[in-house]
Image: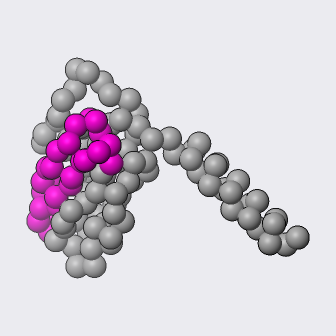
Amino acid sequence: MLLLCLLFISLTGFVVVQRLMPSGTTVTIEAEGRVAYRLSLLENRRVRVKGPLGYTTVEIKDQKVRVVDSPCPKKYCVLQGWKDRGAIVCLPNRVVVTIGGKDNPQIDAITG
């Protein structure tokens, strides 16, 4: 009975997280608190963003995003892998990749 309750709670939590963090079609990449890029998740692309430690490489492919490489020492942002919702944060290099929202056809990319 306890096992069934734990299984139910786990599945319910998964559904709640899926609803709270819906997948979007826009990727926003910020460096040092400023928007560096706002890109479509629907278009495969690779960009480099300059932070205080150097360049962080972000890849968009098959409607998912990941940090390919970063100059930070422990590379936790690289270890997060592919994401289709939520965010990837590289704290040492001050780069934040956020997935969400809907495409704005007037915005292709913003570079800073």
Q: Give the number of callouts.
A: 0
Q: Is residue 45 magenta?
A: yes
Q: Residue at x 38, y 29 (%)?
A: 102
The secondary structure that most of the magenta stretch takes on is strand
Name the residue nearer the viewer: 96 or 8: 8
Q: Residue at x 13, y 39 (%)?
A: 111
Quadrant of res 1: bottom right
Q: Which residues are magenta?
A: 40-64
In the rendered view, tell whether residue 61 sits above or below residue 72. Answer: above
Q: Residue at x 74, y 65 (%)?
A: 7
Q: Is 22 on the left-hand or right-hand side of 49?
A: right
Q: Quadrant of the C terminus?
A: top left
Q: Is 77 on the left-hand or right-hand side of 110?
A: right
In the rendered view, tell whether residue 58 sits above or below residue 107. Answer: below
Q: Residue furthest bottom?
A: 73
Q: Is 102 on the left-hand or right-hand side of 17?
A: left
Pinpoint residue 17: horizontal percent, then vertical percent: 59, 51
In the rendered view, tell whether residue 87 sits above or below residue 19. Answer: below
Name the residue nearer the viewer: 40 or 52: 40
Q: Residue at x 25, y 60 (%)?
A: 67
Q: Is residue 109 magenta?
A: no
Name the residue nearer the viewer: 108 or 72: 108
Residue 111 visible to the viewer: yes
Q: Residue furthest top?
A: 106
